[in-house]
Image (spheres, grey):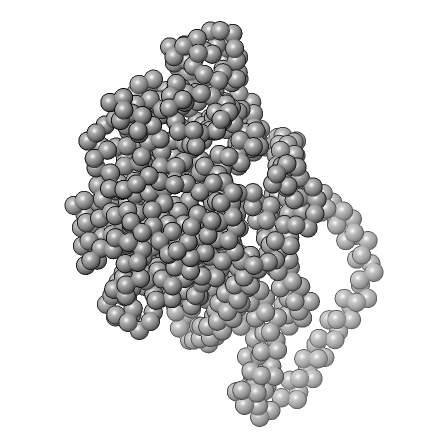
Amino acid sequence: MPRNAALAGCLAVVALALTACGAAPEKADNKTATGKDAATATSAADFGGMDALVEAAKKEGVLHAMALPRDWANYGAVIDGFTEKYGIKVEVENPDGSSQDEINAVTSRRGQDRAPDVLDLGTSFAVSGAQQGLFAPYKVAAYGDIPSAQRDDQARWYNDYGGYISIGCDASRVKNCPTSFKDLLKPEYKGQVALNGNPTKSGSAFGGVYAAALANGGSLDDIQPGIDFFGQLKKNGNYTPVESTPATVEKGETPISIDWDYLNAGYADQFKGKGVDWKVAVPEDGKYAQFYAQAINKDAPHPAAARLWQEWLYSPEGQNLWLKGYARPVLMSTMEGAGTLDKAAAARLPQVSGTPTFPTEAQQTAAKGVLAQSWGKAVAG
Amino acid sequence: MTTDMTSRTAAASPAAAPAASAAPAVRTGRRRARRSGALAVVPLLLFTAIAFGLPAAAMLDGAFSVRDPASGTASYGLGNLTASLQGAYLTALVGSVELSATSAVLAALLGLLLAQAIVTSPLRGLREAVLTASGVLANFGGVPLAFAFVATLGNSGVLTRELGLTDTGWNLYSFWGLVLVYLYFLVPLMVLTITPALDGLRTQWREAAQNNGATHRQYWQHVALPVLAPSLLGGLVLLFGSAFAAYATAAAMVGSSVPLVTLQIADAISGNVLIGQENVALALSLDMVLVAGLVMAVYLPLQRRSARWLA
């Protein structure tokens, strides 16, 4: 349907001779050394090895990506590292966009130059996008090392980095920083507890509600206690609906913020010396981890660059860059075994005990349904 | 007084008579002019068809096509529309109507008082200043406005801390907080809308009423307000629409804690959590169009009456 609408839109606009819709990319020189089309290559070997892949990607010269904020999980350094190493320009459109924005761009710009080459998605968007046939299967060199629960068995997507829900706290404004969900209910935190967004929209806020559910007698099958918890916070006046961003953290409008540990830990670095003493704790009573996923657009305008980008992200260099941004890369334990892990960076991560458990796709879908219906009611007022 | 009245009607009737008798003669010429005028409208119609018609058609198409989550095939049905009128979505729709109606009524009252004050004020400069400021403030909205209020009256806002407002139960991030922020741009909008109508109220009417022994209150009740009613209602519709469609201010300020339909649409259409809700968002937009249409339907029949008096 959107395709028809876009077509109709194009026709009407062209008829008016106002402007043309994005031109179709020229895919003249995308054949690999082995005679395969770069758009269907499923591994570096299909190009005739890593060097040939680099060659093909350099010829394209550009990678078009979306929704990669520079201050998120050290993405700034990841992007710069790629450009430095391979001389390929990375264009990031709408850095603060969402997973749905990325999927929308893939479906509405099919065959256009402006379509994103690669996608960094919430795992459930990766799963549903793969079902809709939007992604190209591609196995990076390290594909086999990714835990099987964190990758699609057809290699259409795989997890890239993740983290735990944590409680960030400005120790210069808050006397005793809370370290558990139970603490957050204390009357001393009036108007101070924030999420990073609306949980029906923001993945980290959704994780925050899930973690609160685990802390309050819920389970991966039952998110309701988490919603009730925030309802209680709202009722006793502790919850502030201001969505925490670097700006609100710096200004002190959100002195306590429930967010991914890599974002909270990043704030600590970012605002040191600006009057913000940001402390980060992963609450023992509500441990919830989640990973994002990488995928390649099936109709990527720069198919070779897209594949090289994946190889870069899953190389020890790329993985360590995420780690430096306090995000836990998916190959962390493999790299620890192989001795390629940046130990200093790993030691700076907020401490967590035990291994994370992830909700299944069905559990997540059910939880989202419950959340969409009762979140508004819980925090209204 | 009496002579004045008769001379007026006498003057008016001869003027009206020739106009009526001349009408048939004029008609043919006017029709020709109308035909060539119609051609000049074509670009506008084309523009409207593309800028408004196409999106509206896409919205209708999307709102009625239901996608099966398992197979991914789409078919026409009422599923999205039904979903958009249930549970949290219905709450948001009702919330939006409540918020818009409350702030529109408040802004209309305050705007009317302010406009009346500057219209009757002998200070010409004051009038100009207020009108100019209104023109600027009526267009001050979105995220900047939200942050101006957050910095002033938010949890750690300047006034909040100076005056210790938190202890009095003040909370900017609530229904009434949002109403306050909306008033900031709705009141100036009302002043701009209603001032011409107030200017149109002739002093003679008031004098006539007073000469007949009417009190101030009676004058307003029986003369001024009935004449103003259509303009007031028109202003109210405009304010309602303005508040109903507002998004950025609310999104930046209250997040999800005040249920609003525009926020729900944003969640459904571009987010990291809900999947496959795009068409429900389109159905919600359709609901908004219907609500706006209903409100307009109340106003349009009255517009003609307003034109008769205030032309």
Q: Nearer the viewer, residue B176 or A257?
A: A257
Determine the residue positioned at 79% across, 52% down.
Answer: B31
Judge whether A287 appears above or below B202 on screen: above
B270 relative position to A174: left or right? right
Q: Residue furthest top?
A: A34
A66 relative position to A349: left or right? right
Judge whether A296 appears above or below A207 on screen: above
Q: Is residue A58 visible?
A: yes
Q: Nearer the viewer, residue A151 or A84?
A: A151
Locate the N terminus of chain A and report the quarter of the image it occupies. Answer: top right
Image x and y of residue A320, in percent = 28, 28
Image x and y of residue B291, in percent = 62, 60
Image x and y of residue B301, in percent = 69, 67
Judge whether A160 appears above or below A362 on screen: above
B47 relative position to A220: left or right? right
Determine the residue positioned at 34% across, 65% down.
Answer: A237
